[in-house]
């Protein structure tokens, strides 16, 4: 019974894709439904699915970044990108390296994708890598400028914090802890929502519950299990990098 994951940050679109998949591919076991790129990467590493349906634009890690990292985390996983906007991406997919689905997803198109996946069996890692390199040079059009300032609570005070001064963000139930050189403050925005507001070139998710400012990193080390630790320039504590996210640092 083939296993797959679905990663799409828009709930209605995710539910629609899952529903269509169950219609056209009833034998497929949907083992995870993910709301962001970080959760998708962890799900791929955990479940080793046969197929991953990845939205190109997601908070935190893009579908392209997830696919690149998944090449190590789960080499046999076939990738199907989901896109709503980019003709350049569609042209690359048409070369047959991987498949794509254009939003809104038509039932007939999904059925054709499933037939292609069943016929292919395993993905061509070298060809996929070439497509990912092509997609990596696509201009990413932001919906709005990334956050420059945040307001966070520290005791009875409300602080105005420059985002560049943040060393890292860490999830704390429905809130987010903001850590700077001077100490911590509490932000009411959940970490998943924060992922979509930060500059993705400056902030990277390193764990389901942690986002780090790349400028704040002093060093990165890997242990025998494949997990990593990050030492910071302005904070004494170290941060854990979960194993799937370590691949994101290899090109740095």
Image (cartoon, rainbow, N blue to C red):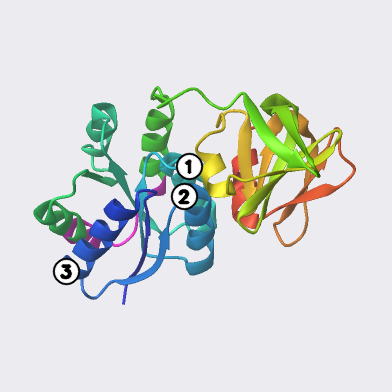
Residue 122 part of the magenta segment? yes
> Circle 2 is placed at which residue position?
36
User: Is residue 8 shown above or below 145?
Assistant: below
Q: Quadrant of residue 156?
A: top right
x and y percent of residue 164 in the render?
A: 70, 25
Q: CA distance from mark 3 to mark 1?
A: 28 Å
Q: Quadrant of residue 73?
A: bottom right
x and y percent of residue 110 in the render?
A: 17, 55
Point out which mark residue 219 bears: none
> Circle 1 is placed at which residue position?
59
Toward the viewer: 149 or 207? Answer: 149
Toward the viewer: 113 or 189? Answer: 189
Mark with earlier residue (2, 1): 2
Q: CA distance from mark 2 to mark 3?
A: 24 Å
Within 10 Å of the Cα at label 2, are there few (<14), some (14-19), or many (20+) other Cα atoms?
many
User: Is residue 139 shown above or below 132?
Assistant: above
- Residue sitting at 27 percent across and 27 percent down? 88
Q: Which residues are magenta?
A: 115-125
Within 10 Å of the Cα at label 3, are there few (<14), some (14-19), or many (20+) other Cα atoms?
few
Within 10 Å of the Cα at label 1, are there few (<14), some (14-19), or many (20+) other Cα atoms?
many
- Residue sitting at 54 percent across and 53 percent down? 72
Toward the viewer: 211 or 40? Answer: 211
Residue 127 part of the magenta segment? no
Quarter that holds the N terminus? bottom left
x and y percent of residue 114 in the render?
A: 20, 60
Q: Which residue ends up furthest to the right in the rendered image?
A: 236
Mark with earlier residue (2, 3): 3
Point out which mark residue 23 bears: 3
């Amino acid at each position: 019974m083939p296993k797959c994951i679905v990663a799409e940050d828009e709930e209605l679109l995710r539910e629609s894709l899952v529903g269509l998949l169950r219609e056209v591919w009833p034998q497929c076991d949907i083992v995870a439904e993910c709301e962001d790129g970080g959760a998708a990467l962890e799900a791929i590493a955990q479940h080793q699915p046969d197929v991953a349906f990845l939205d190109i634009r997601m908070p935190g890690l893009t579908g392209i970044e997830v696919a690149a990292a998944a090449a190590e985390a789960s080499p046999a996983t076939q990738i199907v990108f989901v896109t709503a906007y980019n003709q350049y991406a569609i042209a690359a997919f048409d070369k047959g390296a991987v498949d794509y689905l254009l939003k809104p997803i038509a039932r007939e198109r999904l059925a054709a994708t499933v037939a292609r996946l069943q016929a292919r069996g395993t993905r061509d890692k070298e060809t996929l890598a070439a497509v990912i390199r092509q997609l990596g040079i696509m201009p990413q059009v932001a919906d709005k400028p990334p956050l420059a300032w945040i307001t966070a609570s520290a005791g009875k005070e409300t602080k105005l914090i420059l985002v560049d001064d943040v060393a890292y963000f860490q999830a704390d139930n429905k809130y987010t802890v903001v850590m700077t050189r001077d100490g911590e403050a509490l932000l009411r925005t959940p970490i998943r929502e924060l992922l979509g507001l930060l500059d993705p070139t400056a902030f990277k998710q390193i764990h389901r519950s942690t986002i780090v400012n790349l400028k704040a990193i002093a060093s990165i080390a890997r242990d025998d299990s494949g997990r990593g630790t990050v030492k910071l320039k302005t904070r004494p504590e170290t941060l854990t990098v979960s194993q799937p996210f370590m691949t994101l640092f290899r090109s740095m």
